[in-house]
Amino acid sequence: MDFAAVMQELESLGKERLKKMYIGNGAEEPLFGVATGAMKPMRKIIKKDQALAEELYATGNYDAMYFAGVIADPKAMTEEDFDRWMDGAYFFMLSDYVVAVTLAEADIAQQVADKWIASGEELRMSGGWSCYCWLLGNRKDSEFDTDKLSKMLDQVKNTIHDQPDNVKSAMNNFVYTVAISYVPLHDKAIETAKAIGSVEIKKGKKKPTVSVVFERIQKDLDRGILGFKRKYVRC
């Protein structure tokens, strides 16, 4: 499938209900409102195609940008490529669920995520923290520096309540993911979750919500999923 065929198919798959939902989360025109699951048949046909992914991402169309992340070849992308994609990620569903997810399959994931976390820019920061969530939930514990992750938990504990909303959300998810998926720091993540308590988060046009990450962790521990690792990062 070429660029024109993909765009035509995405348009045909669009649903007004989903379009309104995406806009409520912060998406802007142009977009069609395509369910992520509806993209799977095209993904099976195309598999990976970095050139096509670049064309799609450059459109600024949310659905095309999302699908670009699905068919991208992360190992073919450079740090500059990921920075460019992040420049185009204008709201959290792109920064955290497209760019960060794609980065998580690259060999340079941690170094780029570290840079983004230190950037002081909201969506880069949330993308960096989110990338670690995708990494920790997929890669072996032995691939991470325990001392480094421990310091990151300290950073969350000491700064989360002063961060922009998208960073709060990503940091919250980081604590959850360490507690569930990175066994060496499970106990410290639990302590961190208790210390940060309730976190109020507002995303897109939705009303603020209050997240208590310790309750979320405990609920999933009760399900017996400590040490959970997903087989794939991207669907």
Image (tube, grey):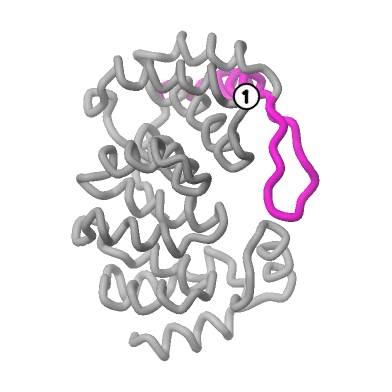
Q: Is residue 206 magenta?
A: yes
**Label 1: few (<14), some (14–19) or many (≥20) C-alpha neighbours in 10 Å:** many
Residue numbers of the magenta segment: 199-227
Quarter occupied by residue 223? top right
Quarter occupied by residue 140? top left
**In this orientation, which residue lies closer to the viewer: 175 or 117?**
117
In this view, 133 is above or below 49: above
> At which x and y percent is residue 28?
63, 70
Q: Is residue 74 magenta?
A: no
Q: Describe the element under mark 1 as helix, strand or loop.
A: helix
> At which x and y percent is residue 72?
31, 65
Q: Residue at x 42, y 60 (%)?
A: 87
Left or right of residue 39, residue 160 in this image: right
- The quadrant of the picture occupied by the C terminus is bottom left
The residue identified by callout 1 is: 213
- Give the residue type that dot 1 points to: Val
